[in-house]
Image (cartoon, grey):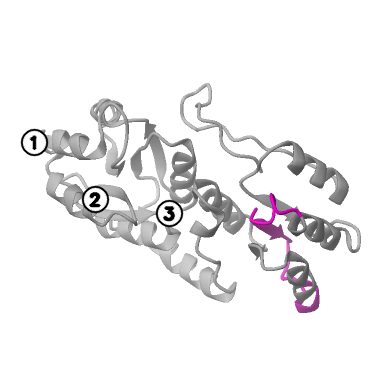
Amino acid sequence: IADLTHGRDEAGDRPPLDVITAVGAQEAAGALAADPCHCVVLELGMPDEEASRFLHALRGDSALASVPVLVHSGHRVDAALEENLRSGAAGGVLEFLSSLDELRERIALHLAAEEPGDVLTLVRPEEPRRASAQLGEDSPTGRTVLVVDDDARNLFALSGILELHGFRVLHAENGRRGIEKLTHHPEVALVLMDVMMPEMDGYTATAEIRRMPKYAELPIIAVTAKAMPGDREKSLASGASDYVTKPVDTQDLIACVRRWLPA
């Protein structure tokens, strides 16, 4: 899975994603050497030892050692096989996923991260599945969320998480466009507002929205940098209802959205 490009698709709804496919360990290694990738999805349906050889080759290259590998299988992986693959990973990021929904969610989070280590390690399968079920039980599906962010990776990650939980997502690449999109879409029930954007940042955009009486009660969740705690206070002072920090954690994001959009 290659990096997101910084454009938008023809419909203007989704930042495009470059996907590179490869058959077998040798072809995959060649593809990675030719194009930088944010993460790799490894299908376990490959011939015996092929996956292990690929992981050994990947981790043996210092330039590729930190690339996250998401191992997908339609069933729970045998413990012995998992241990064998983990030994081949040599301490790199290696996640085992049997659910396509969970795979999509993890891809979105890894693509949004500035560095591979920024994404929290996946909890053992039994825990996240229960958490996901709890988050989805009362989710207000069908509601519209406006995501305002100039980074294509963040747009992809946030959109993927929200759509996975049943929300309809609109995009805007800066605060000014966000205000325009909001005024043209009265169905927007909540705004996710990045604070650092060109032309009009999230603080200014939030304050502008709050000056409009019809949006006085609209939930606006600021997306701030974890390393800059002052961003949170500044966001709330500008009129934000709440905030989440980057890199975004799925459960924290959905829990925050649910607080402001109860079912």
Q: Which mark is residue 195?
A: none
**Dominant secondary structure of the residues highlighted in magenta in the image:** loop
* Vertical placement of residue 67 versus 2, above or below: below
Q: Is residue 24 visible?
A: no
- Label 1: which residue? 213
In the picture, residue 186 is in which quadrant?
top left
From the viewer's perspective, is 123 left or right of 242? right
From the viewer's perspective, is 109 left or right of 241? right
In the picture, residue 200 is in which quadrant?
top left
Q: Which residues are magenta?
A: 61-81
Question: Residue 170: where, in percent of width, then height?
Answer: 38, 35
Cα distance, mark 3 to mark 2? 14 Å
- The amino acid on which the numbered mark 1 sits, given as a three-letter code, is Pro
Q: Residue furthest bottom?
A: 80
- The amino acid on which the numbered mark 3 sits, given as a three-letter code, is Pro
Q: Secondary structure at mark 1?
A: helix
* Camera-side residue of 100 and 35: 35
- Label 2: which residue? 231
User: How many neighbours does mark 1 have within 10 angstroms: few (below 14), some (14-19), or many (20 or more)?
Assistant: few
**Rendered-image quadrant of the C terminus:** bottom left
